[in-house]
Image: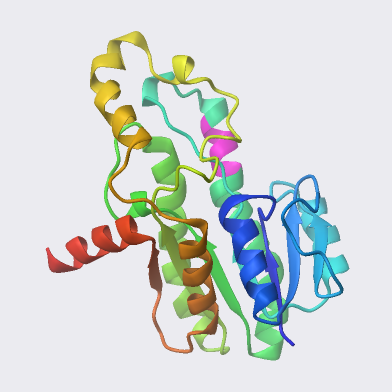
Amino acid sequence: MPTVLITGASSGYGQETARRFHAEGWHVLATMRAPRPDGLPVSDRLRLLQLDVTRADSIAAALTAAGPIDALVNNAGIGAIGALEATSMARTREIFETNTFGVIAMTQAVVPQFRQRRAGVVVNVTSSVTLAAMPLASVYTASKQAIEGFTGSLAHELAAFGVRARLVEPGYGPTTRFTANSDVSMDDAIPQAYRPFAAPILAAFANPPLVTREADVADAVWRAVNDTTDRLHYAAGPDAEALAASRTAA
């Protein structure tokens, strides 16, 4: 059976993706900064590994413990909503460390084994904000857009070795703790001057017409890993799929 390593598997999209691959008979390495078995069917085919994608030593230790893998799913990320002028450069760097540099570091660490075996797939989970601009998310969007460009280029680079690179672009999922990793309160992120502008946007977040479920993302990742065509983009969730379709039609 093949093996998949999934980052950010403690909850939300990553956890559901781990469950999906396990149900399909794969060996699963579910990684997270603070390993806990909540919600995961830990067994001889599903192991928990400690991994902080912002630390080189943690990446090296996790990959040594993991052994050979067949697929890497870079799902770990930080959600962030707020006005740009209220987002410090320290916070900006923190977001990029996980959402951008962490993805690049994990991919760079895994690619050599894929290249040597001339097989393997890297799936990078970004966001539907890369399909259509969303207000109050400029830094978050930038961190995800960087991975879109990175993955598109990487796909060409690795194709000669039989290795695939893919992008999964989830829509908005209110149940996925989008801002759970943030230490910035909404009061800090939305200055008073922005409140009239932000109010209807935040209200729409609270009651969106279409939402992405964890299962939508797990399904998109599953398809991305197993698709042997040259397809690069996989929108996940009805809202993301609608955005992708409207962009294609434009």
Q: Which quadrant holds residue 182?
A: top right
Relative vertical location of residue 33 with respect to residue 24 in this rendering, above or below: above
Nearest the eye: 12 or 108:
12
Helix, strand or loop for the magenta stretch, by majority = helix
Question: In the image, is residue 94 part of the stretch drawn in magenta?
Answer: yes
Which range is magenta? 92-97
Relative vertical location of residue 64 with respect to residue 211 in this rendering, above or below: below
Question: What residue is drawn where x is 66% and y is 53%?
Answer: 8
Question: What residue is drawn where x is 44% and y is 48%?
Answer: 173
Percent from the top left, x then y, of residue 16? 60, 61
Q: Residue furthest top?
A: 192
Relative vertical location of residue 16 with respect to residue 92 in this rendering, above or below: below
Q: Answer left or right for 245 relative to 127.
A: left
Q: How many marks?
A: 0
Question: What residue is drawn where x is 32% and y is 60%?
Answer: 238
Q: Answer left or right for 8 relative to 232.
A: right
Nearest the eye: 86 or 189:
189
Q: Answer left or right for 34 relative to 5.
A: right
